[in-house]
Image (tube, grey):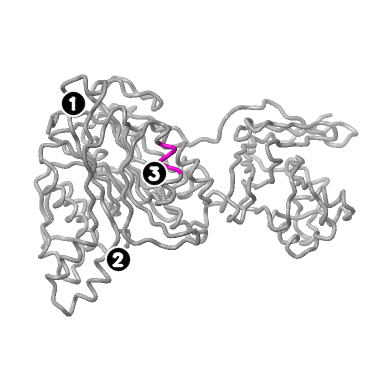
Amino acid sequence: MEDFQTLQEIRCESIPISSGSDAPRNALFFHRFPEQGTDSVDHADISYCSIHSNDVATVQCIECVNNGLPVKHSYHCSNKCFRDAWKNHILHHHSANVSNACIEDNETRGTLNRCNSWPPGDMVSWFDEKIEVVIPTGRMWVNKLGPSNALIPSADGVGFSFKLQSEAAVCADETFAVTDPTVQRLNLSSRSLIWLPDSPKTEKHDLTKKVSKAGNFNVLTYNILSDIYVYVDKYPYCPEWALTWEYRRKNLLRELIKYNADILCLQEVQSDHFENFFKPELESFGYSVAYKKKTKEVYTGNGYTIDGCATFYRNDIFKEVMSYELEYSKSALSLMEKLEPGLRDYARVRLIKDNIALAVILEVVGNFADSAASFSRLCVVNTHIYAGKGFPDVKLLQVSDLVNEIEKTIDSKMPLFICGDMNSFPGSDPYVLLTKHEVDIACAEAPDPLCIFQHLKLHHSMKLASAYASAFLKPLNDIKRRRMKMKHSKTGEPLFTSLTPFYGSTLDYIFYTVDSLEVEGLLELPEFESVGRALPSPFWSSDHIALMGSFRITRPFLG
């Protein structure tokens, strides 16, 4: 009589890790998902850890056994336990000449062999109950499924899914077979473009294809989380390997290409990563770029760097006419001169921040400009406002500087986008200034410890609206409303654009001029279930989500 154990799906992701990381240079990450609602295993033949005798072993060093170590001393309860054993030289005597290493996981009874040398300092780590890091075999992977069965995926197979099923035969040791090898990549949950009323009559838009309607183009904003702000203790809920830049950059690039936006406004783009990764990679996909980094660099051990704002645009649709840069610290310095002398030292510490904005004027070109209605210039502003939670006055100062500089510099008839991480909630003073055109000092929510509000111009004449909030006012059918259910019932903004284990925050926006542009579609918002506990995660590699809208120019500006 046969006893079939729980079928498990194992998803694999191979990534390169830099030598400076504490993870292996390459690692295979297994994500196990029991399919029958149980995590149970057969405990009839369970081994226990040689170090922690009360803990069930999940890792075995087969090469240690092959090199003379007693079997009972080769078992460990976790990869960390295994790593610590190496560090303490418990296994070093038996593996000094080992050129191969292999790990056996009792949970699936599968063995993974590594065909390169594995120095003791190049350890693996255990991250959580669902994710295990295993050493690779260079360009090949060996997965022993029994005494005579082996699965050897090629490098092309890494990143795909395999289903393993254990079978217990009568009067025989357990044997294992691979069933239904699949080709499902570890991808983000799909986010479709939702068309709004009076736009193309389709429920979904394939983001891998260009918008066909004349004059439409997609604008995206995304804070991608600079590596200099990533600390393990800051994101303890995220596996450490998923926080490495080598892993995150591939996820981020894959996500950006999938959205297929015509204009990308990215924040927290680290200057060295811009030069050696994002710029060449996105240029290969047909983008050109303007970039502005913050004003205070930090030393990382490999040189000085800092993050900034990068505005990418498709060079077959747009060409850059000119660009403008705004450093908020300069405006703050001018403001300081208006304050009482006794307040200036405190003002220097509180108000002088290195945040910036980048404005790029683009002109529609090529086939996209064939229609007179679509031939136009437009201005795209990309900014990242100061993030400090105890500085609402600084946020209002920077946003007021931004709108005033735009009014002074950009023609009021030019279609305009203001995109970015505003670090401000819906209904806050900066949000009100942008969408309601003014902030009454007497009604301002932000405290004014330095009495700076009296010196600020807290009004403007631009007719701005938030893309997601304005679409909320349009009548949607039941299907579309359900797919936009992650919007706030009062503000119409997303329920969150940044998510921690404790709360979600809406901080990112796409503002546009309603008298020259119309929003016709919006990128679907992810649900809490698809995002998980918090951001970042192995699937979502930033602590923010991307927002995107499809727009049409309703009043062309010819300059």
Q: Which mark is residue 375?
A: 1
Q: Position of residue 503 (x, y in %)?
A: 39, 54
Q: Position of residue 266 (x, y in %)?
A: 35, 44
Amino acid under label 1?
Phe
Q: Which residue is depicted at the point 18% across and 76% down?
A: 343
Q: Are marks 2 and 1 in contact (CB under 8 Å)?
A: no
For label 2, the residue is: 390
Secondary structure character of the magenta stretch overall: helix
Q: Which residue is depicted at the point 63% across and 27% down?
A: 182
Amino acid under label 2?
Gly
Provide the secondary structure element on which disc 1 rests.
loop
Q: Which residue is depicted at the point 12% across and 47% down?
A: 407
The range drawn in magenta is 277-282
In the rendered view, does 88 fall on the left or right side of 425? right
Alpha-carbon span between mark 3 and mark 2: 23 Å
Provide the secondary structure element on which disc 2 rests.
loop
For label 3, the residue is: 545
* Badge count: 3
In the image, 495 versus 326, the foreground residue is 326
